[in-house]
Image (tube, rainbow, N blue to C red):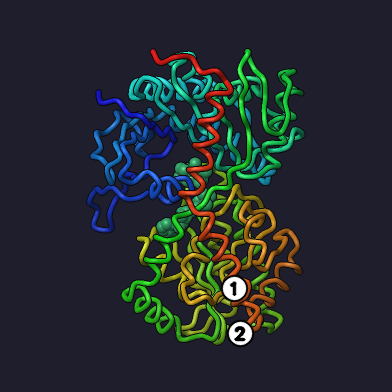
Amino acid sequence: MRLSPLVVVANRLPIDDSVAPDGAFEWRRSPGGLVSALHPLLRHTPATWVGWAGGTGPAPELPDVDGVRMHTVPLSADDFRDHYEGFANATLWPLYHDAVEQPEYHRRWWEAYQRVNQRFAEAAAQVAEPGGLVWVQDYHLQLVPGLLRELRPDLRIGFFLHVPFPPPELFMQLPRRAELLRGMLGADLVGFQRAQAAHNFAQLATKVLGLPASDRRIGVDGRVVRIGAFPVAIDTAEMSALAARPEVAERAHRLRQDLGRPEHVILSVDRMDYTKGIEQRLKAYRELLANGDIKVRDTVLVQVAVPSRDRVAQYQILRDRVEHQVGRINGEFGRVGEPAIHYLTQPFDRAELVALYRVADVMAVTPLRDGMNLVAKEYVAARVDGTGALLLSEFAGAASELEQAYLVNPHDLDGLKQGLLAALRAGPEDVAARMRAMRDHLARNDIHAWAASYLSALEESGTLAGRRPAA
Ligand code: ADP
Ligand code: G6P
């Protein structure tokens, strides 16, 4: 077993097993914000990524991906159902996203969550070198920092939550809330997307565990755990370079022709998830068509919605409803060869996705709640010609940074319609000025700056906490 100075532990590996259109088995990059953020960051570092490869049964042997070692953790069919689909995605995911769908609580799911977290902690303990650094990611693995500290007290442990961390009123619903908080506090540094999340966490540490806490530090078991906001980012330069490639520009040009050369192209790119506000957006679009504010010949909507967690009931219901809505809108407002909505559920490679960003005059990113939303950042980075209007939900983490976007409340249907019209009708100077400010922000705050600020805070936390010597 080769040991690594840096170990990233995340439920997902950056590649996923999938079936190609010809029926063959292939490995493909997994869609989702966590992988999009970490994959470019780790490339060519001597790191190990501990994670799950997407199937059930024994863990497959994977090759290195861009120089990063893949260490797979297996999930059985029961683990998949009770840990991944159950506790992670039908308890924590809805609860952490404002309970926009009802979270479910089952004791069997909690048992699976503990069991799988133990397995991930053991895998990380196996591959981390003495005194090494282990960076645990996201809501699937909140118990890992605590479990890992018991196994390997010599390690420096970071935890980062990619999704929102809810206010006490919601978190208090969790039957095993104390254990979840204790698990996270096994880390030396607990990072969140927004300052509000760190504040919620500190409040809960005091309320549930009786610990002394500020928005920056929590005292536990004679240690000091640092907490803070580290808004995750993208590889801005890489995205811009890809967008500037002549073949991508050419592809964008052809896409516009294939779309019938409309005056305006609106684009949305989401995982098929009820947090993304897809239904509300389609409803707003339908009303604009019905009122005659927009016309199919002049304006088209491209909705990319890649299926996600598709055996979980709430996701199946959402997909059926979205597809019903798309069919209805196309039936009512489309013409032969001119659908009102171009609806695509396929995963795309990066170049094709970036060509879509380049063709979109308006990018509509309107989640009901989102930890960050990297699609919004990717769009801005891809607009190398400085044009393009971003319509952005106030409830996406990205809204705290991309303040020059056309901001909307996606729960307010009229506000959503007005925001969409404002973005469509904005003058070129206004659009360019907003885009310039957002591009400047992303050039300065990219994924490398994110990692540097997190890891330097983690270094400091190690000294503050009086780390034990390497085993
Ligand atoms: P989430 O983390 O909830 O999935 P984000 O917007 O933060 O949402 O991240 C989604 C990531 O998945 C982005 O990097 C986006 O480019 C990628 N993605 C979304 N849809 C597709 C698709 N159809 N094909 C390939 N990548 C996709
Ligand atoms: C969000 C989560 C990630 C997750 C991704 C895709 O970005 O924060 O942890 O990997 O969604 O979801 P999936 O269930 O396919 O891993």
Give residue 367's mark.
none
Q: Secondary structure at mark 2?
A: loop
Picture quadrant of residue 340: bottom right
Going by the numbered disc 1, the residue's amino acid type is Ala
264 horizontally vs 288: left or right: left
Where is residue 316 shown, x and y percent of the image?
52, 49
How many other residues sit within 10 Å of disc 1, few (<14), some (14-19) or many (≥20)? many
Q: Secondary structure at mark 1?
A: strand
* Quarter of the image where the C terminus is located: top left
* Residue at (56, 86) in percent of width and height: 298
Give residue 295's mark.
2
* Residue at (65, 83) in percent of width and height: 427
Picture quadrant of residue 457: top right
**Considering depth in this image, is 20 or 439 the residue closer to the camera?**
439
Question: Which residue is denoted by mark 1 in the rendering?
Answer: 389
* Residue at (70, 32) in percent of width and height: 171
Q: Earlier in the sequence, mark 1 or mark 2?
A: 2
**Considering depth in this image, is 180 or 43 the residue closer to the camera?**
43
* Quarter of the image where the N terminus is located: top left
Going by the numbered disc 2, the residue's amino acid type is Lys
283 horizontally vs 468: left or right: right
451 horizontally vs 30: left or right: right
Q: Is residue 150 above or below residue 24?
A: above
**Considering depth in this image, is 187 or 318 the residue closer to the camera?**
187
* Residue at (35, 73) in percent of width and height: 248
